Amino acid sequence: MSAELTAVLNYAINNDGIVTRHEALALGISPRTLDRRVDDRVLIKVAPGVYALPGALQSNRSTLRAATRALGAVVSHQAAAWTHGVHIVGRSLVVSVPHRKTHQFHQVVVHQLTDIRPEDVVYFGGLPVTSAARTAVDLAAVISPRALGRSLDELVRLKRTTNEEVDYLLGILARKGKPGVINLRRVLDARLERTGVSESELERRLLDVIERAGLPIPNLQYKPDWLRSVNGRVDMSYPDALLVIEGDSRGWHGDEATFQSDRERDNLAQLAGWRILRFTWADITNRPSYVASTVRSALANTDLV
């Protein structure tokens, strides 16, 4: 085996089994020798100017690399989420091109995205992939709002992006008729606490964190004696521990009336000898271990844990 062919094969091995004709020629192999190696099935032609080692396209990553090289594409949508560490049920081989004519690649879904900016692309071992924030924007067009929320939460948990970064990018890319914009805005509104989330959704998530941590299930929508005068209730409580747990879905300030009411309720609880723990949407979705450990600490000197 010639040194030039060895160099080409080693290059392909180090790049998910894929090499382009331009790369092979740059490594010193002649066009004629390269064509002979294709005829001999040492390399498999998978697209014009793109070659793979035999069996390489059995790997999703190799298929994505071949598709990006063949189409001038970037890994996007579910495939980008997968690359960032977030696994979504459904298609895992997805790329996007700036201009879609007759672009096709075996087993790969090809989208057209005319608004991908250079700063929206990152590289994993030379593989072009939409950034985490851009991936969240694109996913909004192809998955359900619930799946979108879970995916965004996971991207944030993995520290791939932040809700604020996705919100900023959406502000740049949003336009009339762009798919997914409304769904993503609603998801972000909840996580950034701009408009708050429904009481039932916040309570469900908070209860799920408590249950997963192996903590006792609290009383729901409890009416303590100290709120009887206003016919009030609390989201969750451990009456035996004189402990209230509130899911706070409002923004940092909230409206004046709500802010005042919450302070009065807190004072009533304190006067009655109760403690109140308040957790925001960000706490519950991004820091569940903090929520669980705080509740556990509050119950530490009781018979409940």
Image (cartoon, grey):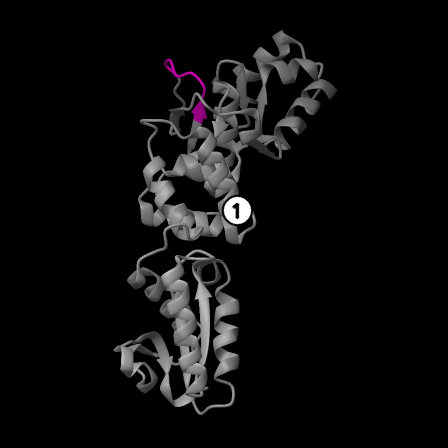
Foreground residue, 95 or 188?
188
Residue placed furthest toward the right: 3
Q: Residue at x 45, y 66 (%)?
A: 279
Q: Residue at x 53, y 80 (%)?
A: 297
Q: Residue at x 30, y 58 (%)?
A: 198
Label 1, residues with CA under 10 Å away: few <14, some 14-19, many ≥20 = some
Q: Main secondary structure of the magenta part?
A: loop
Q: Position of residue 69 (x, y in %)?
A: 53, 22
Foreground residue, 8 or 66?
66
Up the image or down, 243 lies above or below 260; here it is below
100 part of magenta stretch: yes
Q: Quadrant of the N terminus?
A: top right
Asked whether, in this view, residue 21 is left or right of residue 213, the answer is right
Q: Which residues are magenta?
A: 96-102
Up the image or down, 126 lies above or below 271; here it is above
- What amino acid is at disc 1? Thr
Q: Position of residue 136 (x, y in %)?
A: 44, 40
Q: Which residue is mark 1?
A: 162
Asked whether, in this view, residue 99 is left or right of residue 33, the answer is left
Q: Position of residue 5 (x, y in %)?
A: 67, 20
201 part of magenta stretch: no
Q: Position of residue 196 (x, y in %)?
A: 37, 55
